[in-house]
Image (tube, rainbow, N blue to C red):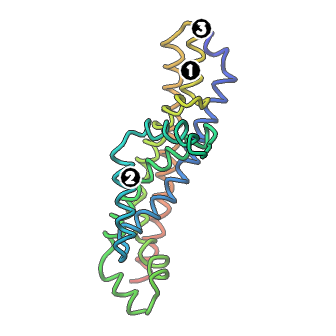
Amino acid sequence: MNEVIAFYPILIKGTITTIQLTVMGAILALVISFIVGLARISKFRSVRVIAIIYLEFFRGSSALVQMFFIYFVLPMWGIYFDALTAGVVACGLNVGAYGSEVVRGAILAVGKEQHEASQALNYSVYKKYRYVIIPQAIPIMIPTFGNLLIELLKLTAVASLITISDLTFMAQIIRVQTALTLEPFLLILVIYFIIASILVKLVDLIAKKFSKGRNIMTAGDK
């Protein structure tokens, strides 16, 4: 194990890269989740169809193949991404497809009376979703989004296959240079677990904050 610890600089670099992939991928996935989730309940059929095509494609095909396609195939058509960007785009698009269903389900779970109240107040569609529907739907989304965030973290491990210097890539380097297999992969397993535990705690804090705000709002209404 001491031989592996001697490689701590590249392990730190790999950890930072993994966190970057996770954070940037999560931001992209969140944006896509809301765009596609709202598109799925649009009154325009063409918008719903486009959203469904995106959803079924990214849910129904391999995330690894999607990553390879973005990094290796798109340049043949003149569209170039560096390895990190390709990884972020692939992870964001893939997880965003699942997240869109979370958004759609949470919005549909908001009571019909809330929509009727918005109409009674003469709110525009934007105001209705911005001030009434989405704030009530967010607490419903958070637990599932937390699970998707952990899945995204695990998904970043395959990014090493497109030469991204993440934790998995660095473990491979250590394995080649030291001829050790158990130690480097056991160590990154622990690092992944620590990162995941931190993310779970953060999601729990966010969930508690939104739940508290919701409770205050409900008490105020009473």
- Tell which residue pokes out farthest to the top in this image: 179
Q: Quadrant of residue 211?
A: bottom left
Rounded to the nearest angstrom, the CA distance separating label 3 from label 1 is 10 Å
Q: Disc 1 residue type?
A: Ala
Q: Quadrant of residue 62?
A: top left
Rounded to the nearest angstrom, the CA distance separating label 2 from label 1 is 29 Å
Percent coordinates x, y for residue 73 in the rendering = 52, 39
Q: Quadrant of residue 136?
A: bottom left
Relative height, residue 44 to residue 80 (above, below): below
Q: Secondary structure at mark 1?
A: helix
Which class describes the residues within 10 Å of circle 3: few (<14), some (14-19), or many (20+)? few
Of callouts 2 and 1, which one flags the residue occurring earlier in the amino acid sequence? 2
Which class describes the residues within 10 Å of circle 2: few (<14), some (14-19), or many (20+)? many
Residue 75 vs residue 158, the one in the foreground: 75
Which quarter of the rendered picture does the N terminus lie within? top right
Which quarter of the rendered picture does the C terminus lie within? bottom left
